[in-house]
Image (cartoon, rainbow, N blue to C red):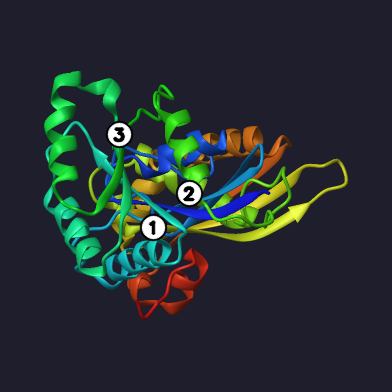
């Protein structure tokens, strides 16, 4: 009998959810940066191992929302958890239980939901520091099992995967064995470019921007031409994204193109534009492009 089920990865911002998803699937599907709140919407990563198909759902970090975009991101995270067959709560082992992590635990407690806890980034801490944190999680009453993992070194991932395989429901696979995600390539490409904004631009500018794939043209030789728009809120931000003589946007496009060529195994032609849209965070169409609920 085969098993198949959804596994939601939840946690505070920067707990390591996207890194874990990529490690579990074995390829890059979710973007990663040192900045918090990089993930804005749900990302599904599919991996089939033996008789089990895992449908990992990477969710935005859960925090106290202030803006409409914040609320939509947090709503997407909880929606992913509510619909999942199993939930993994990721906790950054380099920190104590944060306020956001405690809020997540309290909501899980109120819902009567049991979860698996994963202490992440264990390659960065002394082993003795892990035990008090594990005990604190165990004392919450919402954690059924605790795993200590490093997605960067793959430490502990096999044990976590084996446990999840044992608790997922019996049933047929929902996707072909070789499928990696339900995300359309247009959205994956936009996210890859948005990752470069987080990596190459400082302070708040990445949070004031979003990326959309405007055109996608396939050619007979297998290559693809991708045209994208980077939306920012002010003219000054547009100048920063462009850089002196267009140097910044060319480098953003170059890095995005190289990653996409590696992911897709084909030649990519990339064209980027920057447009000012002052209130894009209040634009329903932008939320639809991101896969978020505008009223969330």
Sequence-first tag of 3 and 2: 3
In-front residue for pair 28/227: 28
Residue 252 visible in rendering: yes
Q: Is 54 left, or right, of 236 in this rendering?
A: right
Residue shown at 38% from the left, 47% from the top: 241
Distance in Å between CA atoms under marks 1 and 2? 28 Å
Query: Of tags 3 and 2, which is closer to the observer?
Result: 2
Which residue is tagged 2?
167
Residue at image point 50% right, 44% down: 166
Whether residue 247 can be seen here: no
Q: Is 113 in front, or is 179? A: 113
**Res. 215 image quadrant:** bottom right
Q: Which residue is mark 1?
A: 40
Secondary element under disc 3, as helix, strand or loop, is strand
Assess disc 3: are there few (<14), some (14-19) or many (≥20) residues with their C-alpha within 10 Å of its C-alpha.
Answer: many
The residue wearing badge 3 is 120
Image vertical order of residue 211 relative to residue 148, above or below: below
Observer-nearest residue: 102 or 32?
102
Which secondary structure, mark 2?
helix
Quarter in which the C terminus is drawn: bottom left
Horizontal placement of 165 versus 113: left or right? Answer: right
Nearest to the eye among marks 3 and 1: give it.
Answer: 3
Q: Residue 184 appears at what percent x and percent y?
A: 63, 57
Q: Earlier in the sequence, mark 3 or mark 1?
A: 1
Image coordinates for residue 218, horizontal then vertical, percent: 78, 52
Which is in the foreground here, disc 1 or disc 2?
A: 2
- In the rendered image, the residue lying farthest to the bottom is 295
Residue 116 horizontal/vertical position (percent): 33, 46
The total number of labels drawn is: 3
Please state which of residues 70 and 23 is positioned toward the viewer in this rendering.
23
Mark found first going from the N terminus, 1 or 2: 1
Mark 1, secondary structure of its residue? loop
């Amino acid at each position: 009998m085969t098993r198949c089920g959804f596994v939601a990865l939840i946690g505070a911002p920067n707990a390591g959810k996207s890194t874990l998803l990529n490690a579990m699937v074995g390829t890059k599907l979710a973007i990663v940066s040192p900045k918090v709140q990089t993930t804005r919407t749900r990302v599904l990563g599919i991996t089939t191992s033996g008789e089990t198909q895992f449908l990992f759902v990477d969710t935005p970090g859960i925090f106290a929302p202030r803006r409409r975009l914040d609320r939509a991101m947090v709503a997407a995270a909880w929606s992913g958890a509510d619909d999942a067959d199993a939930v993994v709560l990721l906790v950054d082992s380099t920190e104590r239980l944060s306020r956001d992590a405690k809020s997540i635990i309290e909501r899980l407690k109120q819902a009567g939901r049991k979860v698996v806890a994963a202490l992440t980034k264990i390659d960065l801490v002394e082993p003795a520091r892990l035990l008090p944190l594990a005990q604190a999680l165990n004392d919450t009453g919402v954690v059924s099992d605790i795993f200590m993992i490093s997605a960067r070194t793959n430490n502990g991932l096999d044990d976590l995967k084996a446990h999840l395989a044992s608790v997922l429901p019996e049933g047929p696979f929902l996707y072909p064995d070789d499928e990696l995600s339900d995300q359309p390539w247009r959205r994956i490409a936009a996210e890859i470019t948005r990752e470069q904004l987080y990596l190459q631009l400082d302070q708040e500018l990445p949070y004031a921007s979003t990326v959309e794939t405007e055109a996608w043209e396939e050619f007979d030789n297998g290559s693809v031409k991708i045209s994208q728009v980077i939306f920012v809120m002010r003219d000054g931000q547009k100048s920063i994204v462009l850089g002196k003589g267009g140097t910044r946007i060319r480098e953003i496009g170059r890095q995005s193109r190289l990653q996409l060529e590696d992911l897709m195994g084909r030649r990519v032609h990339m064209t980027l534009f920057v447009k000012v849209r002052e209130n894009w965070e209040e634009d329903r169409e932008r939320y639809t492009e991101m896969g978020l609920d505008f009223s969330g």
